[in-house]
């Protein structure tokens, strides 16, 4: 029994070793960079170039390069589209501004519609101004539903 | 206020629609080029200017007008490109003496890997770096390697999808020289 538990623990440790030994910055970069051939997040891609990019990231980190410098080098090699999120400058800024602008526009539209509906809704005072004749007919019609 | 919001929403939808149409038209252009060549037509080869890997500076396709050009799309990580490399090295050394220009377009690749690949397989012709792979979509390249021949007047003559052999490439070059 003890031998089995020890064997299971050894297998688990063997499987977890790469993850335990991995530099967390490696995963961080892989989640910010795309595979240029399959257009998936590098962390999810297993294409040949994705494997090569992973090796590049690992060796550059081991050589003391910062994640920012590595991402800059990847952009130099593969263009800005290699970044999972566009840079917040130039044309890429639009990708950040359009959702914010859209959300602000939608909020403004909802606010404007709500105000318009409130204005159009009859208030209690208007209801109180019904003529006695109309109130009598209303009572009769409602009474018909009670039967 | 209502009219303004409605006009803004319509304008936003119109802009997004135009962007979508432009994107789709650009994506389809490369496939249309490949289809035209397959149908026996001779469309003008999309022009480009890319950085050279074999030396400093850039090369513009249109600067090679007057000469038959062989364009080979490849990458160092592509296994089939390795199978094709020795054929290209042999065929290019034969045809370059007769004035045919060979141009390799290293696509979606590390430039250092591409240089090492060219050295290893003895590719002695212009190699250009297209890290973004933008020329692949313009030429309708769907996988690597792919080879195009360009006539002296800058028109596409032949398209070879996949690994080529010496005989097939020789015939494509001869056809481009005759056109």
Image (tube, coloured by chain):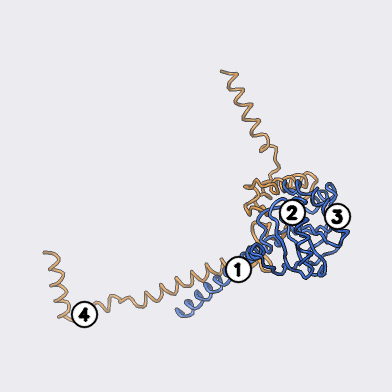
Chain colours: A orange, B blue
In-front residue for pair A52/A67 = A52
Q: Along the polypeptide, which appears first: circle 2 or circle 3?
A: 3
B167 left or right of A17? right
- Circle 1 SS class: helix
How crowded pointer 3 is (Cα within 10 Å; few <14, some 14-19, many 20+) is rated as few
* Marks 4 and 1 on same chain: no
Residue contact at pointers 3 and 4, CB within 8 angstroms: no
Q: Residues within 10 Å of mark 4 (few under 14, many from 20)?
A: few
Q: Which residue is mark 4?
A: A130
Classify mark 2: helix, strand or loop: helix
Circle 3 residue: B94
User: Which structural element holds mark 3?
Assistant: helix
- What residue would you read off at disc 1? B25
Q: Nearer the viewer, mark 2 or mark 1?
A: 2
The reply to whether the C-beta atoms of the residues labelled 1 and 3 are less than 8 Å apart is no
Measured along the vertical axis of the image, is residue A9 above or below residue A41? Answer: above
Per the model, the C-alpha gap separating discs 2 and 1 is 32 Å
Sooner in the amino-acid sequence: mark 2 or mark 1: 1
């Amino acid at each position: 029994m003890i031998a089995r538990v020890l064997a299971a623990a050894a297998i688990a440790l063997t499987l977890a070793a790469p993850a335990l030994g991995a530099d967390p910055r490696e995963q961080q970069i892989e989640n910010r960079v795309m595979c240029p051939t399959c257009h998936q997040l590098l962390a999810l891609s297993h294409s040949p170039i994705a494997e090569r990019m992973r090796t590049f990231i690992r060796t550059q980190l081991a050589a003391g390069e910062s994640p920012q410098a590595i991402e800059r080098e990847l952009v130099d090699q593969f263009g800005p589209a290699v970044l999972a999120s566009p840079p917040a400058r130039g044309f890429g800024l639009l990708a950040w501004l359009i959702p914010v602008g859209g959300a602000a526009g939608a909020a403004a539209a909802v606010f404007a519609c709500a105000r318009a509906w409130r204005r159009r809704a009859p208030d209690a005072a208007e209801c109180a101004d019904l003529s006695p004749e109309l109130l009598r007919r209303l009572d009769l019609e409602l009474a018909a539903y009670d039967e | 206020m209502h009219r303004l919001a409605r006009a803004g929403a319509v304008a936003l939808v119109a802009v997004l629609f135009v962007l979508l149409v432009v994107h789709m038209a650009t994506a389809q252009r490369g496939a249309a080029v490949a289809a035209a060549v397959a149908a026996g037509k001779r469309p003008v080869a999309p022009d480009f200017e890319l950085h050279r890997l074999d030396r400093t500076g850039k090369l513009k396709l249109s600067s090679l007008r007057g000469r038959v050009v062989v364009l080979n799309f490849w990458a160092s990580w592509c296994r089939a490109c390795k199978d094709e490399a020795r054929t290209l090295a042999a065929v290019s050394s034969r045809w370059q003496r007769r004035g045919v220009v060979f141009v390799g377009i290293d696509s979606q690749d590390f430039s250092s890997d591409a240089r090492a690949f060219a050295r290893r397989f003895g590719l002695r012709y212009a190699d250009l770096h297209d890290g973004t792979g933008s020329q692949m979509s313009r030429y309708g390249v769907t996988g690597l390697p792919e080879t195009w021949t360009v006539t002296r007047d800058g028109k596409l003559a032949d398209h070879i999808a996949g690994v080529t052999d010496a005989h097939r490439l020789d015939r494509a070059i001869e056809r481009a020289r005759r056109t």
